[in-house]
Image: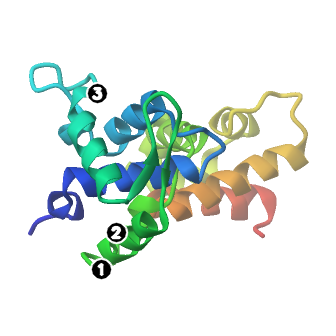
Amino acid sequence: MPTVKDELSLNDMILISVSNVSHTNDICTFERLVFECFKSFPKNFGFRKYPDWPDSSKLNRPLRKLREQGYLKGGAKTQFALTELGIQRLKNISHIESDEVELIRPATGTEELILQSLLKNKLFQDFNKDSAVIDNLDMREIRRLLGSTSETSITTLKNNLIFAIRIATEYKENNLLQFLKGIDAKYFGGN
C-alpha cells in the first residue's frame, strides 16, 4: 500500500515544508526550505549518489512553478510564504490520508533530539525486553534518562518527564509512552 509520501508531488512536499517552517519561529529562507524539504522527505530531496546530502537544485523549477501558480510568494533572496491559495492547497492535500495532517505539524529539532535520545537509551531498550526493569531503577538512572544531574530539583525532573511523555504521545511512540508513564507512576506518583 502506498504511503502518503508516495502520493505527494514535489510541489506538495515543498508546500508542506514551507508550512512546517512557518509554524516555527524561523524565517523561510531558501536555505531553511532546502533543509526542511530534505529533513521531511530525504528520498525526494537528496542527491542520487549521495543520499545523505540535500540537493537544492531539486527545488528550483518547482519553486518557480509554485510562484507562477500563486501558491507561494517570495523568493530565494528574501523568504518564502504560503499564499491563501497555497493554504487551500494544503487543506486539499490532507484528504489523501488522514495521517497527512500530521506531516504538516512541525516538529522542533529539540523534540526530535529528545525523542531519539529516549528511544536509543539503554534503559528503554532493556524495558522492551523486560518491562520489570522499571521496578529496579534508581534515581541516578532516571536522572540520566531525563538529561538531568544530581543537582536537578525533583520538580524540574518531573517537568522533564512530563515533557518526554508529551513528545512520546505526539509521536505515537506507544512503548516509550508506556515506559515513561511506568516511571512516572512508580517514582513520581503519577499525574
- Amino acid residing under circle 2: Glu
Mark number, residue 95: 1
Tell me the mark number nearer the camera, choosing from 3 and 1: 3
Q: Which residue is mark 2?
A: 100
Tell me the mark number nearer the camera, choosing from 3 and 2: 3
Mark 3 vs 2, N-terminal side: 3
Q: Which residue is mark 3?
A: 56
Give left or right: position of 161 versus 178.
right
- Amino acid residing under circle 3: Ser
Q: Is there a contact, CB below 8 Å, between mark 2 and mark 1?
A: yes
Classify mark 1: residues with Cα within 10 Å, few (<14), some (14-19) or many (20+): few
Is the residue 40 above or below the residue 101 in the image? above
Instruction: Tell me the CA gap for discs 2 and 1.
Output: 8 Å
Give left or right: position of 16 versus 21.
left
Is the residue 45 above or below the residue 163 in the image? above
Tag 3, which secondary structure? loop
